[in-house]
Amino acid sequence: MPEAAPYSGDIVDSHHHIWRVADLPWLSGPMVPRIFGPYEAIRRDYLIDEYAAEATACGITESVYVQTNWPLDRVVDEVRWLRDVHAETGRPSAVVAAADLFDDDTPQVLRRQAALTPLVRGIRQQLHWHERPEFRFATAPDRMKDPVLRKNLGALADLGWLFELQVFPEQLADAAGLVAAFPDVTFVLVHAGMLIGQEYVEPWRAGLSALAELPNVVVKLTGQGTFVHRVEPELISFVAGEVLARFGAGRAMFGTNFPVERLWTTMPELVGAWKDALAHLPPADQQAVFAGTARRVYGLGG
């Protein structure tokens, strides 16, 4: 058997942020407990030049910006800003925007975003709910059943946009029902289903298996430091193995989740940990996870 070799090709970062603190009340306001722990170190501007310097040094050649929870009445402004950043710098390569999918008027907001730039590929609205308040984003655990949300997912289908699905393990069964109802929408499971801890492994595995049966789901291998607040090679290997066994490399993609992950690591350490975790895979599978899947899902040029 050939010796395992870490990936050495170019990388597409499927999940990162940039921001100006002035646009984000959650970041500039009072410190409160949050899902990723203390966050003083990222309460500052993190702009495209800083991201690009870090990313380029790690072999990242294309990237997907994911919305950063601007106020919902400013989600068009967020897209306009990203359009202008891209015009000046050539980055990011694609944008996942935000919208209030629980609002009847959202289809016209989506059309306004689409008219601004072809960079927009989809929408993320975080639906994760948990009994612990600092883990909670959605207002209730059953928001995936909301008829307005479902109507607006139909509007995403009309635009050819995807939906970034961010839920916890115990919500994955409901998520499978939602995904099955919209076979024409690609759903991107954020942070590999957000495995909080060992006690959630069984519902997480079951949920991944249910979602893997649905061909319109792909998975982001991202955010594995969220709950442990460090780069944990064993956790990364475990999550990657469980995801790839169900979805295969053609439905999985790497992302940095920077600058959030910067709270506990550097980008070279993070990228290196994922390369090591996947080094046993055939080169074609490594290429898919680190670049090919994201290029296909987000329609990037390569």
Image (cartoon, rainbow, N blue to C red):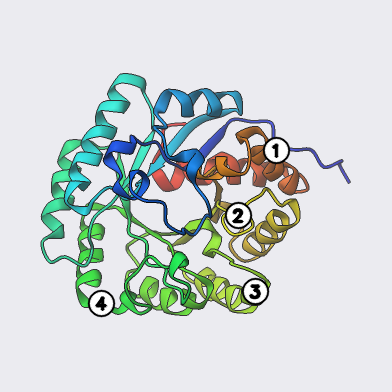
Percent across and percent down for residue 9 are 64, 31
What's under tag 4, amino acid-wise?
A: Asp
Is residue 259 visible in this depiction of the protein? no
Q: Earlier in the sequence, mark 4 or mark 2?
A: 4
Front residue of this view, candidates 188 and 166: 166
User: Circle 1 — which element?
Assistant: helix
**Cα gap from disc 4 to disc 2, whole angstroms:** 29 Å
Q: Earlier in the sequence, mark 1 or mark 3?
A: 3
For disc 4, the marked residue is 146
Q: Which mark is residue 201?
A: 3
Number of residues whose C-alpha sits closer than 10 Å to that of mark 1, classed few (under 14), some (14–19) or many (20 or more): some
Q: Which mark is residue 224?
A: 2
Instruction: Look at 26% across and 64% down and name the residue there.
Output: 153
For disc 1, the marked residue is 272
Number of residues whose C-alpha sits closer than 10 Å to that of mark 4, classed few (under 14), some (14–19) or many (20 or more): few
**Cα gap from disc 2 to disc 3, whole angstroms:** 14 Å
Q: Residue furthest front?
A: 30
**Cα gap from disc 1 to disc 4, whole angstroms:** 41 Å
Percent across and percent down for residue 214 are 47, 70
What's under tag 1, amino acid-wise?
A: Gly
Instruction: Look at 52% across and 37% down and name the residue there.
Output: 12
**Cα gap from disc 1 to disc 3, whole angstroms:** 25 Å
What's under tag 3, amino acid-wise?
A: Val
